Image (cartoon, rainbow, N blue to C red):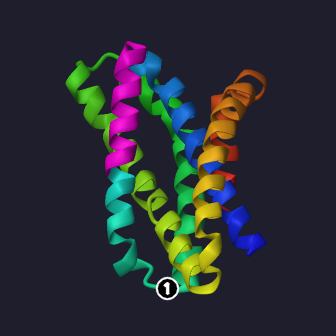
Amino acid sequence: AWSLLSYFLFLGAGYIMIQVALIQKFVLFLGHPTYALTVIIFSMLLASGLGSYFSRRLVSGSDRRLEYILASITGLIIALALAATPLTSYAVGLPLPLKVIMAVLLITPAAFLMGMPFPSGLARMEQRYHPSVRWAWSLNAASSVLGSASAVLLAIYLGLRDTLLVGGAMYL
């Protein structure tokens, strides 16, 4: 049960680190912190909610598929970390609606996949260690709180790109 519980710990911290770093990364691009907060949180929650919904069909209890999804998340976050600054610098002069669409399109693929590991892990936890499901939820929530503070700390000392990379590595 400990390995599965640590899985939820890393998922919570990784998700929030990525989200906080993306909000900060898109503030200048979208022109205002409120826009960045709204666009990033809305698009990530919508896409990861859809990923969660489709996880039963796409993962369906297969450890190999879940491993592939986790690796894909890390790959997409690495690509996003490396491409976000050049793309947003190039498109900074576009009208706001186009920049919002661009931000959503950049974030959606990774966020969709980021919605799959949590319900897939919960299904495994429920099958193997039913009483520990509550611990999985609580550890995930607690690590989200700690992950947000860690994201700010990492962003100050390492930068936003490296914060994204650490968040992506949490999915491995």
Residue at the image position 37 percent from the left and 17 percent from the top: 34
Q: Which residues are magenta?
A: 30-46
- For the C terminus, give its image quadrant: bottom right
Q: Give neighbour class at mark 1: few <14, some 14-19, many 20+ (Cα, 10 Å).
A: some
**Where is residue 2 drawn, in percent x and y?**
77, 71
**Where is residue 74 drawn, in percent x and y?**
60, 57
Left or right: residue 23 versus residue 36 is right
Residue at the image position 27 percent from the left and 20 percent from the top: 94
4 in relation to 103, above or below:
below
**Where is residue 90 drawn, in percent x and y?**
41, 25
Residue at the image position 52 percent from the left and 44 percent from the top: 80
Whether residue 42 appears in magenta in the rendering, the answer is yes
Q: Nearer the viewer, residue 58 or 1?
A: 1
Amino acid type of the residue that numbered disc 1 sits on in the rendered structure: Gly
Q: Nearer the viewer, residue 99 or 17?
A: 17
**Where is residue 42 drawn, in percent x and y?**
33, 38
Q: Which residue is mark 1?
A: 61
Whether residue 72 appears in magenta in the rendering, the answer is no
Magenta part mainly helix, strand or loop?
helix
